[in-house]
Amino acid sequence: MAFINLAVENITFVRPAYFIISGFIGIPNIRYYFVFLCFIYILAVVGTTLVMTVITLDHTLRSPKYVAVFNLAFTDLLSSSALMPKVLDIFLLSHYYISYNDCMTFMFFSFTFYAMQAFNLVVLSYDRVMAIMYPLHYQMRVSHKLILSLIAFFWLLAITLMLIEVGLLTRLSFCKSVVIQSYFCDHGPMYRLGCNDITPNRAIAGSYCCIGYSLSKISTYRERVKAFKTCTGHLSLVAIYFLPITFVYIFGNVIHPNARIISLSITTALPPMLNPIIYVLQTQEIKESLKKLFQTRAQFRIAAKY
C-alpha cells in the first residue's frame, strides 16, 4: 500500500515549465511607475558606486566600520542589479513568462542579497554598540579581522538559508496555478501555489535594545546627544529597511493587492538608493573625503589646461 501511495504521489507531482509574473498587470498608467523605478535604480547604482569608490581611494577610511559600510554598498548594488533590471524587463517588454529554473535562480539571488542587507545592518549595529558602550576600548574590541569574519559568516549564512528555502520550494507540486501574484519570483506567493502540505519558515531578527539602554546610562545631556549622533545614520538605515516592509507584511491582507505589490516594490527599491545618501550626509569622514576628491580633480583639470 505504501508503494502504491508513493507511486500516486510521483504521478501527481507537477513541476511547471514556466511561471507567469502578474504583479503590475492591469494597473492604470503603470509605465510611469516603471520610469520611477528605473530612476531609483540609476541613483542606487551611482550612489553605491560612489561610496565604494570613495572608501577605496581614501586611505583614511580604513577603519572596521568602513569595511562594513563598503560591504553594505556592495550588497545594495548587487541587490538592485539582481532585481530591478529583471523587473523592468518583465513588465516593460512584456516578458511575463519565466521558466521554472530561471525563476528559482532569480528568487535565490534576490533573497540572498536582500537577506545580506539585513545582516549588514547587524554588523553595523555591533560596531555602533561597541562605539557607544566601550568608547575607550573600541579599537581593541572591534578589529578588521572581527568585522571581516562577521561579514564572511553572514554571507555563508545568507547563501545557506536561501539554498534551503529554494530547496524546499523544489519539493512542491504546483498543481493549482502558475500565476505568481507579485512583481518577481516572490517566495510567499510561490509556496502558496503548492499542493503539498509544506510550510517553510524564514525568520531574521535583530535587536537594538542595547543602543537605547546604553544611551539611557550616559550621564550628561551633551554626552547623550554625542552618542545619539554616533548611531543616527545607522538607526536611519534600520528604519528605512525594516519599518516599510514590516508595515506591508502586517497590513498586507487588508490593503488592495496592487497597493501591496507597489508598496513592497518601493520598500525593496528605496534602501539601496537612500543608504549612500544617508552615509554621505551623516558621516563627516565621507563628506571630507568627497571634498578632497573633488578638489584634487579640479586641480588636476586646471593643471591639464596649462
Image (cartoon, grey):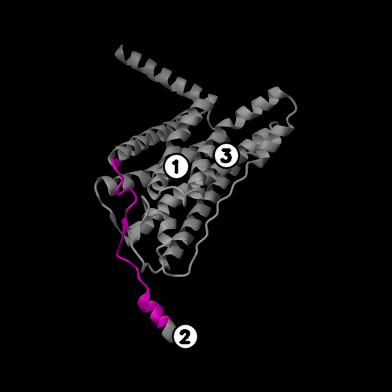
First reached walking from the N terminus: tag 3 or tag 2? 2
Mark 1 Cα-neighbour bin, 10 Å: few <14, some 14–19, many ≥20: some
Q: Is residue 236 above or below residue 255?
A: above
The residue under label 1 is 267
Q: Is residue 16 left or right of residue 272?
A: left
Q: Is residue 279 above or below residue 91?
A: above
Q: Position of residue 84 (x, y in %)?
A: 35, 44
Measured in 3D between alpha carbons, the distance from the residue under mark 3 to the one under mark 2, in whole angstroms, is: 53 Å
Which type of secondary structure does the marked residue at label 2 adopt?
A: helix
Which type of secondary structure does the marked residue at label 3 adopt?
A: helix
The residue under label 3 is 124
First reached walking from the N terminus: tag 3 or tag 1? 3
**Residue that protrudes farthest toward the top in the picture:** 306
Q: Nearer the viewer, mark 3 or mark 1?
A: 1
The stretch of residues the image draws in magenta is 6-30
Measured in 3D between alpha carbons, the distance from the residue under mark 2 to the one under mark 1, in whole angstroms, is: 47 Å
Q: Position of residue 256 (x, y in %)?
A: 41, 48
The residue under label 2 is 2
Q: Amino acid at mark 2?
A: Ala
Q: Residue at x 38, y 17 (%)?
A: 298
First reached walking from the N terminus: tag 2 or tag 1? 2
Is 10 included in the stretch rendered in magenta?
yes
Q: Residue at x 42, y 47 (%)?
A: 260
Which type of secondary structure does the marked residue at label 1 adopt?
A: helix
Is 25 included in the stretch rendered in magenta?
yes
Depth check, front residue: 38 or 74? 38
